[in-house]
Amino acid sequence: MNAPPDLHEPAYVKGLNAPQREAVLTVDGPVLMLAGAGTGKTAALTARLAHIIATRRAWPSEILAVTFTNKAAREMRERVGRIIGDAVEGMPWLGTFHAIGAKMLRRHAELAGLHSNFTILDTDDQLRLLKQVIQLAELDEKRWPAKQLAGLIDQWKNKGLTPADVDAGESERFANGRGGELYGIYQDRLKTLNACDFGDLLLHMLTILRQHRDVLEQYQQRFKFILVDEYQDTNSVQYLWLRLLAQRHKNICCVGDDDQSIYSWRGAEVANILKFEKDFPGAAVIRLEQNYRSTPHILGAASGLIAQNAGRLGKTLWTEVDAGERVQIIGVWDGPEEARRIGELLESHQQRGGSLDECAILVRAQFQTRELEDRFIAIGMPYKIIGGFRFYERAEIRDALAYLRLVNQPADDLAFERIVNVPKRGLGDKAVAKVQMLARAEQVSLVTSASRIVDTDELTPQARRSLGNFIADLARWRELVRDLPPADLVRTILEESGYTTVLQAEKSVEAAGRLENLSELARAMEEYDTLGAFLEHVSLVMDNDSAADGEKVTIMTIHAAKGLEFDQVYLAGWEEGVFPSQRALDEGGLKSLEEERRLAYVAITRARRLCTILHAANRRIYGQWTSSIPSRFIAELPAEHIVEQTSLSGGESLWRANWSQSADPFAHVQRGTGRGPGWQRAAGSGTYSPAPQRLVEARSSAVSLGNKGRSDLSLGQRVFHQKFGYGVIAEIEGNKLEIDFEQSGRKRVIDSFVTIA
């Protein structure tokens, strides 16, 4: 039990609960503050800082306080300043990892082969330098793009690896084993330029601290107390840097929540927080579990879900607020109906006097916002996109639209200027300027000017060839407008122009997201008979007054929502393959599944009063209709904290029984190849007309079988699965099959997703 509040405690401790006070007053030795979502960790952290200074355990200049964002650093400085006044100005070591790393490195630059006035390169300069490195190595930049190498080097630096530390296995990830070599050349070029990138700010300092004992002892002696916010988001180099600095005094306090570690894709290691007690024996572990944000039902649902993860330290959130409403689970037929249902719920909320500013829609992937945006524009629902652009404003979508506009209207000079060298065609600024000059002189469009100039010697042979090929492509695509549906046309253009090839070669999370968005664009175009009709629709969408004042519902990804809270949260797309993400599972297996579950936990705990989760029986992904089952995360929510609804006829909740602890995390969706799920909206109504009998029977079978299993399957029977191919049934348990696949080995799948071979 914690001691009751002391009446003589300082003002900055009053109002804190018992664990928060303990976290503030336990200043000697290592401390891990496990702060659950909405438990007031910032108040405890800033009060702890103030307490150390107020009790004169250390001067402000002897405290290292590290955050992840400049915003968090400013907020901490302001809060501490309100408590201790001007003394906060004497805290030169309060800031982000990169800011503090840069300050240290400028003091010891010569030990890293730099001068103290070194330049920190931005992303564009880094890519330009890497392109030079790739060219000097006589590599094909189209096959081995600079962005891919930049991503690899960033990963290596996040892991604390210098070029000498990159082994042959890692080197194989780029240019057939030359990755480490190119990394070394890049680092040498940086030193020649007296420059470094953001990854170097900590990597150089880590190397200096390891190799120069006097520098290490200087900082170990200086920093009597170390505080680290969002410790679960630290990567390897940050972890190693902190651990070195804390070895003398061991007064390190790390604040974080292992259940909210969701950034492995940018190098974060949840293992850092999980092994804190091993790194610092005798550490005090203080759990902040009283939640000041959400209702008991929301917390109960989130806690029951995250309890399924094995890799966690464990805590149980609780609250003193009223129980509130249970988490709503809504099943719909497809993506468009999901958008319609959310719109109706928001309109109902408005009619009851509620504000849209209190509401947020969170999605797993950016491509999911397109249907929501189209629906909201159709019904006049004001919205804003946080942490990104509206769908049709994203760079890759604007590029694709520019191609389409130029095919539809050859006189569209703005579209020509945007994509004449996107992707790179070897056309420099001088070549484009000559095309523009001729167009002005003859008062013709840029397409016409380009067509004329390629027959002259105004351009270099390479530029003439590249521009001529581009003009020929435009002419060919223009001929295809008559024969191809708009969706097939854009897929053809993106493929033949090399646009998708460039993104695929990047092999990064960002590039994969852009490809998803382009697939969603093609999917959106399937609803239109002509290219002109679709482009007119886009013009109307883009004309939507996004700058208008007034209330707006917020749309954002779950990653972008971390740290935020809303009265009402709508979680869209909770189906297998969407959430958890199929790509994440394919690339990371069980480790990624646990991170996806942590992401789901973060999503639910953004809600203060009402949380609604939606899943669709059908969704179009990568241009194909996918027959989906609800996310396993829905089945893991405790029944006493949820209420299920469905617009599908009967038995939808039976899907919960399909997820056992042993279910294979990779076998769960069957890709369709048709152009639609078979249901069409009835004209002028918000309902659906009957689907073709084949699809009705398939859906009815899948929903009604539950755990009974199919009677036409038997042991030893040869079957076919859309993802895993041909195989032989080895075991049957209800509606689950163990199948020995010829190419994929043994997998556990649901019987409705196989056909008899």
Image: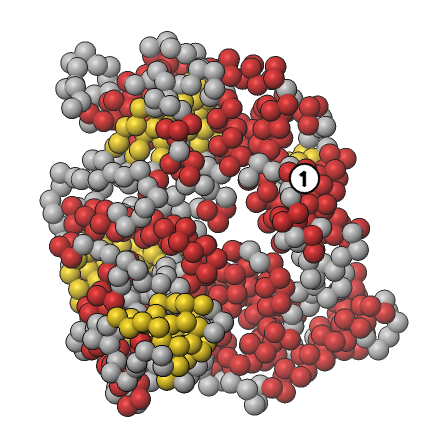
The answer to whether residue 521 is visible is no
Quarter of the image where the C terminus is located: bottom left
Examine the rendered structure and indicate whether residue 577 appears above or below residue 287.
below
The extreme right residue here reads 457
Residue occupying the point 39% across, 67% down: 747
Give how far across and how far down residue 109 sits, in percent. Answer: 67, 25
Residue at x 37%, y 36% (from the top left corner): 274
410 is higher (above) or lower (below) than 261? below
Residue 115 placement (x, y as % from top left): 71, 26
Relative placement, left or right, of 487 versus 323 is right
Comparing 445 with 359, the one in front is: 359
Q: How is the image coloured?
A: secondary structure
Q: Which is nearer the eye, 222 or 357?
A: 222
Residue, disc 1: 163
In the picture shown, does residue 4 fall above or below 318?
above
Residue 102 placement: quadrant = top right
Q: Please report the residue visible at 27 percent of the width from the left and 54 percent of the height from the top.
A: 569
Q: Is residue 225 left or right of residue 198?
A: left
Q: Amino acid at mark 1?
A: Pro
| Residue 29 percent coordinates (x, y) | 36, 18
Element on which disc 1 rests: helix
